[in-house]
Image: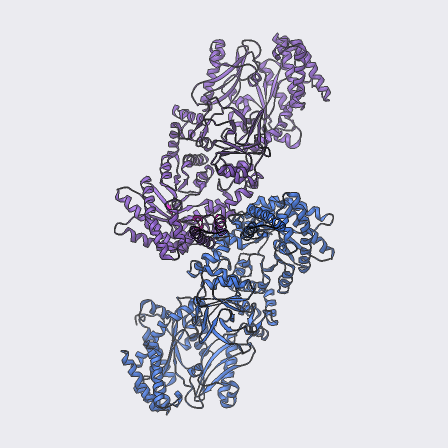
Chain colours: A blue, B purple
Amino acid sequence: MKSEKKFVYLFSEGSKEMADILGGKGAGLAEMTRIGLNVPPGFTISTETCRAFLKNGKMPEGVMDQVESALRTVEKSTGKKFGDPANPLLVSVRSGAPVSMPGMMDTVLNVGLNNETLRGLARKTGNGRFATDAYRRLIQMFGTIVLGISAEQFNDAMNDLKRERRKKQDTELDENDLLDLVFRYNEIYSRMGFEFPENPRDQMEMSIEAVFKSWNSERAKVYRRENDIDEQMGTAVSIVAMVFGNMGNDSATGVAFTRNPNTGEKILFAEYLVNAQGEDVVAGIRTPKHISDMKTELPKAYKSLTDSVDKLEKHYRDMQDIEFTIESGTFYLLQTRSGKRTARAAIRMAREMADEGLIDREEAVMRITPKILDSLMHPQVKRTGDEVLLGKGLAASPGAASGQLVFSSERAIELSKEKKPLILVRPETTADDVRGMVVSKAFLTQKGGMTSHAAVVARAMGKPAVVGAELIQVNSKEKKLACGDTILSEGDEITVDGTSGEFYLGKTQMEDPGISPDTDVILGWADAIRKIGVRANANTPEEAVLARKNGARGIGLARTERMFLGNDRLPIMRAMIMSRDEAERRINLDRLLPMQVSDFVEFFRTMEGFPVIIRLLDPPLHEFLPDKEEVMNEMFRLRTGSKSGKEREKLADLERIFETIKNLEEFNPMLGFRGCRLGISYPEIYEMQVRAIIRAASKVIDERKTIYPEIMIPLVGHVNELKVLRQRLEDVAREEAGKKPVEYKFGTMIEIPRACLTADKIALYADFFSFGTNDLTQMTFGYSRDDAEGKFLARYIEDGILESDPFSTVDVDGVGELMKIAVSRGKKTRPDIEIGICGEHGGDPDTVAFCHRIGLDYVSASPYRIPIARLAGARAQIEEKRKKI
Amino acid sequence: MKSEKKFVYLFSEGSKEMADILGGKGAGLAEMTRIGLNVPPGFTISTETCRAFLKNGKMPEGVMDQVESALRTVEKSTGKKFGDPANPLLVSVRSGAPVSMPGMMDTVLNVGLNNETLRGLARKTGNGRFATDAYRRLIQMFGTIVLGISAEQFNDAMNDLKRERRKKQDTELDENDLLDLVFRYNEIYSRMGFEFPENPRDQMEMSIEAVFKSWNSERAKVYRRENDIDEQMGTAVSIVAMVFGNMGNDSATGVAFTRNPNTGEKILFAEYLVNAQGEDVVAGIRTPKHISDMKTELPKAYKSLTDSVDKLEKHYRDMQDIEFTIESGTFYLLQTRSGKRTARAAIRMAREMADEGLIDREEAVMRITPKILDSLMHPQVKRTGDEVLLGKGLAASPGAASGQLVFSSERAIELSKEKKPLILVRPETTADDVRGMVVSKAFLTQKGGMTSHAAVVARAMGKPAVVGAELIQVNSKEKKLACGDTILSEGDEITVDGTSGEFYLGKTQMEDPGISPDTDVILGWADAIRKIGVRANANTPEEAVLARKNGARGIGLARTERMFLGNDRLPIMRAMIMSRDEAERRINLDRLLPMQVSDFVEFFRTMEGFPVIIRLLDPPLHEFLPDKEEVMNEMFRLRTGSKSGKEREKLADLERIFETIKNLEEFNPMLGFRGCRLGISYPEIYEMQVRAIIRAASKVIDERKTIYPEIMIPLVGHVNELKVLRQRLEDVAREEAGKKPVEYKFGTMIEIPRACLTADKIALYADFFSFGTNDLTQMTFGYSRDDAEGKFLARYIEDGILESDPFSTVDVDGVGELMKIAVSRGKKTRPDIEIGICGEHGGDPDTVAFCHRIGLDYVSASPYRIPIARLAGARAQIEEKRKKI
C-alpha cells in the first residue's frame, strides 16, 4: 500500500469524541458499539476522505483497499459475504456530517443486491417477496441518488403497475409484481442511458462517491449557509450491515426520544411499526403504534429498548433521539444523537437533569443557548390545534404577530394612520420598504435567506419575520398572496410566527412571553456562576420595575430626555428651548425641576440597594420640536386665503417655532450640538438636573433606604469637557445637598473614538466609564444608523462585506479594539474605575461574552433582554473556565 | 549665609545662553560684556528669584545679601558708591523676561537719589538742573510703578506748575521749578498716605519687588495669553549703573537696527538725539536725527557704534535691535536683542545672510516661520502713505479686504444678494453671526482675543479679521461705528488688514500675494532639505497648473465630484441620479464619460512626471440636487391659483425632483450613503470613472509623456469594501486598457476610525493610504464640522477646552493616535505602502511636522498652501536633526 493514511474506521475503532472525523452518525454508531450496545457491524469512511475527494474529483488512493479490508471484518462478524450469491451481506451507505444536517444528504440502502444475490437472500430468508422488494428499492434509490434519475419516473412506474394490477397499496404487490417492477425500473435506466451495476463493489463505490457529492448539493449548501455551518467540513460515510424490520411479525422498526421533546418531561417518547422498514415510519403510510404496546407485543425487544435508552441517556448525559430496528426478535440500534427539542423542553430538561445529578449546573446553563431563551422572550403562537397553517419559510426574526395584509410601503403608511396592525408581505424587501416596515408588526417575504434585507432589518427592529417562504406567491400589483389554493387580499388577517417560520390564516391565540419557574431556576444558577454584572437601561420608573423583576441589579442607563416627552412636560421643554435668554430658560427649567425630582425618587426607590446611573440630557434640542416639514405645510396652509384672528395668532406661533427649528437645524445632528456640548453651553440645564438628582436622593435617603446614585455625562471626547462639568456640577451638588452630604459617583459615557484613545486622561475625572456602543459604532464605522440600515447596511451583510450587523453585535476588530484601548488606558490612571456598557449591544450574547473577556464590570441591557444577558454572562464565564482547563 | 543658592549674576558671569535665568535683557548685557563691548557695569537677579517671590509673596532669603555684594563690585568699577552723598552711584532697575514682552513690564531709573545724594550729583556733574530733573523723575516713576499712584496726578502737578510759571515745555523748567515740582510730588505722596523712601537700599529693594510683581499685571497676563507665552516663567531684574545721554552736547542717546527692519536691506538703520535721555526718543517730543549726522557730530562715538554693530551682528548671526547712550563722549551699549522685522524683510535677510555666509541654509530656513510666509500669501495692504488709519486691534486672521460696513448677519445676508463686498462689524461675534460671516469678506470686532469666536471662525474660513479693537465703539442697533472722532455708518467703506491688525477708511491699494525671488530661493533650499513630499489637492486642471507653479510635485487628491458641478454637467449628473434603473443610469453615465476623460487628460498632462491621485465619487448624491426647501416653496407657489400648461409641466418636474430628494434624504449625510458605499451599490458609477481614468492615461501615454495615475477609493471602513471594489474595478481597467496595459496604483483614503484600527487588513488590498483627516477628525471627535464651527467649537477654543481648532491642526492625542496606529499596522502587512495625507490639514505647519515625525511619504495641500507645506516640511526635518545632535 502506498498510503498509510487511515481513511476507514471500524465502529469498534471510533468513539463519540471523533465526530469531526466520523461525522455525527458514525461517531454515534462507534460509541454505541464501544459501550456494548447492539449495533449492526460496520465502519465509517472519514470526512477527510470526502474533502480530498471533492478537492481532487476522485477517491484518494488506498481508500477502497481499506474499505475492502473493513468489509472483511464485517463479513466475519455477520457470517455473511458481500456479493455472495448463497449468503449475501447487504449494507447501507449512509451520510453523516460532523454537524447534524437532517435530510440534507443521501443514503443508499440494500447495497449488495443483484440478480444473483437476490436469489440467495430469498432463499436464506425464505421470503421471496421481501427480497424482491429490497432489490427494487435498491434499484430505485441508486437510480435517483447515485445516477440522478428523477424520482418521478420510478413513482410513475410503480403507479402504472398498481393501476394495471388494480392494487391500491404498495404492500398489496406480490413477488411477481415486484419482479415486474424491477424489470420496468431497468427499462427506465436504459432509457436514460444507464445500466444498473450488477457488481456489488461497483454499487458500493458509486454510492460512497454519491454521498460525498451530495455535500455540495444545492439544498445542502443553502442549509449550511442558513445555519452558519462550515462549508469546508465535508461528510463522512458509514457502511452498516443491513438489518430488516420487515422480516415478519417479530420484526419492527421505530424511533425513540429518551424524554418528551415537546415538554421536556422525563418519559420515554417513542413509536414503532411492526414488520416495516425505517422509511415506512418516515413516509407516514402506516400510523405507528405507541411504545406502550410494544411491552406486550415484543417484550424482549422492549426490555432491550428501555435498557438501551437508560444507558444512552446516562452515557451521553443528554436526551437522545434513537433509531432502532428489531430483526426477527433481535434489537438493533441504528442511530443515536442529541434530540432536538422545543425551547421550553430544553429548559425543563436542563433543570431536571441537573436536579437528577446527570449534569452539573454549569452544564445545565451551557445547555440553554441565548437563542433558546430569546425565543421564549417574544410573544409566541399558543398552539391549540385549530390553527390553519398557510405555509412555512425561514424563521428569520423571533416572535409572533397578527395583522392585516398589506403589500407596499405606501399603503402601509396610509393604513397605519388608522392604527391597524399590519403585516407587510413582499416578494423581497429593499431599502424602499423600510418605511413600510417601520409601521408594520411583522414581515413575510417569498424570497431571501437568513441574511436577506428583510431578515436583517427585522432583527434590527426586533419584529417577527418569516422570509424565503418559497412556496407562496406574492403579487404586489394585484395585492394578492397565494398560499397553495388559499388566495388572500389586502386587509385579510394572518399571523406570522418568526420563531418557527410558520404563518397562519387569521389571528391565532398568543402566549405572552414570561419567565417560567424552570427558567427562573436556571437563571438563578447563571447568576451564581456569572462574574460580570447585569444592569438595565430604563427610561421610566415603570421600566425600572420590570427590569428589577427580570433580575437586573441596578440601572446602567436612565435616559433623562425620555422623561421630557410626556404630555405635561413637552410644552415646558419647548418653552425652555425657545427661551430668549438664560433668565427665561431658568424659569422654565425651574418648572421641570420638580418633575425630574419625582422621576428620580421613583428610580431610587425601585432600585434600592443597587446603583442607578442617570445620564444628563443628551439629544439635540430640535428633537423636542415638531417636524419641520409639517410646520412648513401648516404655515403655507394658514397663509393662503383670509385668516381669522385665531389663525393669525397660530401662524405667528408657528413662525416662531419655525425660526427656532431653523436655528437649531443641523447637517449631521448625530455629530452636532448635543450631549455635554449642550451642557457646557447652557450650564443651567445640567445644573437643574444635578439639583434634581441630589434632591431626590436626599429624599429617599430620608426614607432610610440605601441608594447608589451615579451621574453620567454623555458625549465626552476631551478630558476638559468632563473636567469643566465636574467642577461646575459638584459645586451645585454640594450646595443642594447642604449639611447632609449625598454620596454619588460622577462618570462619563465612552462613546466617541477620541474618548477611547484618551481614556487615561479622562479617567482622571471619571469614577466610572460606560461604553455607549451605539454611538461608538456609528463613529467608528462612520455609519449613521438611521440612514445605514435602510440604505446599504442590509446589502453589506447580505453580500458578506460585513459578517454581522455591527449595531446588534459589537464589531470586535474595530469598535472592540477601541474598547480594549479604553479599558487598558482608563485603568492605567485609575485602576479601580468601574466600567460597563450601556449600548443596546449590552443585551447581545456575543457582546456580553466579549465584555466579559475584556474585563468589564457589568453590562446594561433593555429590561426585556436582562434574562439573556444574565445567561450570556454565565456562559462566558464557563467558557473561559473550560478554556483554561 | 544660610542659602548657597545663586540668585544674582554679575554681567561678567552671564552669557547669551542664559536667557532662561537672566531674561533676554540680562543675557544680552552679559553677552555684550563678555565679548568686550562697552556696557555700564551691573548685575541681574534671576527669573527663579521672581518665581520664588511670587509663590511665597516675599523675597527668598539671601537675595538682598547677594545684591549687596554685587553692588560692591559695581561700585568698585565705577568708582562711585551707592548712597554716597559725595559721589553717588545711581542705577536703573530693569525688567526682562526670557521672552520679549515689549512695554509690558516696568523699569525704574535713577535709583539711589535722595535729598543728600542729589546735592552730591549736582556738585559732581556741575549741573544742578540735570540732577534735580533726575530726582523728580525718580520720585515720579517710583510713585507710579512701585506705589501705584496714578500717573495723572504727577502729570497734573507738572502741568499746573508750567501754567503758573507760564512755561510750555518741560525743558523750559529751571532747577528751581524742578525743586518746587519735587516738593509738589512729595505732597502727592503724603496725600496718598505714602512717603518717598530716602534710603537708597529701600528704593532698590522696593523697585525690584515692583518689577517682579509687574509680571502678574493685567496687561502682562493678557499679552502672554495672546502670544502664547508660558505663564510660569517669571521675569529677571537687571540693575545697571546709570549713564546719562543728557549731560551736554557730547552726550546722546539712540537706537539702531543692524539692517533695515522694513526692507531687510543691509544698511545701518538708526537714529539718535543729542543731550537727551532714552525716554525722550520714545516719547517723540523731539525729532531724532538720522545716524549719518552722527558721523560728523560725534565721530568717535560713531566709530564705536559701527564697530559695535558689526561685532554684534556677526556674533549673534542675526539682525540686532540696539539701545545706546553716549555720556560725555563715551559710548555705552544698554541693550541688544534680535530685531523685529516685516515678513518681507525677514525673508530678504535670511537669504542674504546665508549668501554672506553668516548663517547656513538650514538656519535661513529656520528663520522663516510658516507664519511669516503665510502673511505673504494673503492679499496685503500696499502702503502708500495715503492710508487713513482708523485704529488697531489684534491681528486675528491674516490678509486684507475692503468692503462696505454691515452690522448684523440678517442685513449681511440681504446685502450679499446685491453681490456687495461686505465687512461685518460686531461688538463681538457669537454662533448667530456665522451666517453673516459666511457672506462677508472680513470681520472687525471691538472685544475678544486671539481665540475669541470671531478669531477662530475667521481663521477657519480663511478670511481676514481684526478683533479686540478696544478703542472703537460698535453700536449695532443704530448701525454706527465710532473710531475716535470718525463716525461711520452702514455702507461706508473700510479696509481691514488682519495681518497687521490695522483698519483704514475707504478702500486702500492692495498687493497681491505672490512668491518673491527671495522666497523662491529659500523655498528651493527647503526643498533640498525636506524629506517629506509635497503634493497638491486640486479639483480642476486650472488648480493643478497653479499647484505646479507653487512647487507641488504631484496631486495628492483630485476630487472628481467637483468636476460634475459645471453648467454643462450638472443636468446630466441629475438625470443620472434620477434614473429609474441601472440601464438609464448607464446611459447618463456614458454621457459623462468623455467629460471625465478630458478632465483627467489635463491633469495627467499638467503633472507630467509626477503622481496624480484621482478619488472616485465621494459625496452623497443629494448634494447634486437643488435645495429641498426651495423646491417646496416653488411647488407651493405653483400649486396655488390657476396654472398654465407650462406651469403644470414644471410642477410635475418639481414633484419628481422632490420625490428623489425625499428618497435620498438622510439624517446624517456625512455618515450616510456616500463614498465607496455608493460605489458598491451602484457599480456602474465607479466603473465609468475607472474607464475614464484608464482611457485618459492611455491617451497621454500615447503623447509619450510619463505619468503615474493612482486610483483612490473613499470612505473605506472594512477591508471587504476595498477587496470587492478592487477586484471589480481592476477587471474594468484591464478591459479598458486592452493590449497596451496602463500602470497605476490602487489605494484608499483612510478617513474612518475603523480603517485605522484595521489598517493591517486593509493594506493587503491597498498600494497606498491617504489620510482624509477632515472626516477622520469629524468621526474621531464626533463633530460635524459644518455644525460645530458655528455652534460650539469656537466656544470650546475660547474657553480652552480645546487647545486649538482640530480642523486646522491635527489633534495629536486623538486623531494623531489613530494615524500612528494606521501607519504601524499598515506597514506591518505591506512595508512598502505609500502613505500621505490629503485633508486640509496638509497645509498646516504643525500638522506637516507631525506627518514628518510619524513617517508619512508626503502631505497634500491646497495650491495656495504649497509654499507653507514645503517650508514646514524642511523645518520639521531640521528640527529632527537638531534634536538628534
- At which x and y percent is residue A542? 64, 61
Left/right of residue A3 with respect to residue B509 in the rendered view: left
Report which quarter residue A483 is drawn in: bottom left
Work out which quarter of the rendered image holds the N terminus of chain A and state it: bottom left
Q: Nearer the viewer, residue A819 or B859?
A: B859
- Across and down, in percent, residue B777 comes to 49, 45
Q: Position of residue A268 (x, y in %)?
A: 53, 81
Specify the farthest residue to the top: B126
The front one of A452 and B790 is: B790
The image position of residue B411, as x and y in percent, is 54, 37
Decide if residue A68 is in sight here: no
- Residue shown at 34%/80% (left/top)? A72
Q: Is residue A634 above or below residue A259?
A: above
Vertical order, A187 against B343 (above or below):
below
Asked if B823 appears above or below A221 in the picture, the reply is above
Which stretch is magenta?
Answer: B614-632
B620 magenta-colored:
yes
Q: Which residue appears farthest toward the bottom when viewing the image?
A: A126
Q: Is residue B413 visible?
A: yes
